[in-house]
Image (cartoon, rainbow, N blue to C red):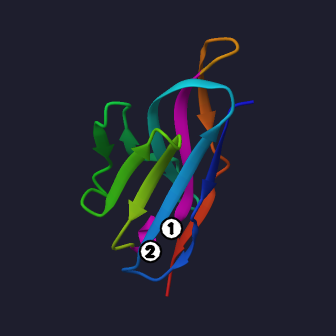
Amino acid sequence: QVQLVESGGGLVQPGGSLRLSCAASGSILSIGTMDWYRQPPGKERELVAAITGGGRRNYADSVKGRFTISRDDAKKTVYLQMNSLKPEDTAVYSCHAVITTLSPVRPLEVWGQGTLVTVSS
């Protein structure tokens, strides 16, 4: 019943910017850490950025200084602001969260459907 819905992917030129969003819905008691992962074509999935419920952030070295993760708990949404995009940022981006449900009260690991980001001129 609990799900994550992503938006914001698309085609962008090198040096451009995109803002991804991922909104949680369902019978939710609380949301813990929220993460963004990506999987480039033909490569393994990697963690891009994470943010705890207290606002502590962690970034992959490859995106540090260019990407910013944030969250809006009132909207149950996590964002990824992506600036100075490079062709090597091309990947399917997926959000992930640890969500405690109401009925029953238990933690679940939930994944979004993924959204494609293509950086190309």
Residue that lies at the very extreme toward the right in this rendered image: 1
Question: 87 or 77: which is nearer to us?
Answer: 77
Question: 28 or 67: which is nearer to us?
Answer: 28
Q: Where is residue 102 drawn, in percent x and y?
A: 64, 17
Question: 56 or 84: which is nearer to us?
Answer: 56
Which image quadrant for residue 16?
A: bottom left
Q: Is residue 26 left or right of residue 48?
A: right
Q: Is residue 95 magenta?
A: yes
Quick check: 49 above or below 54?
A: below
Is disc 1 placed on a helix, strand or loop? loop
The circle drawn on residue 90 is 1
Amino acid at circle 1: Thr
Q: Where is residue 49 drawn, in percent x and y?
A: 38, 46
Q: Main secondary structure of the magenta part?
A: strand
Magenta segment, which residues? 86-100
Q: Where is residue 53 drawn, in percent x and y?
A: 38, 31
Are discs 2 and 1 less than 8 Å apart at CB?
A: yes
Q: Is residue 12 left or right of residue 71?
A: right
Q: Is residue 34 left or right of residue 58?
A: right
Quick check: 80 above or below 35?
A: below
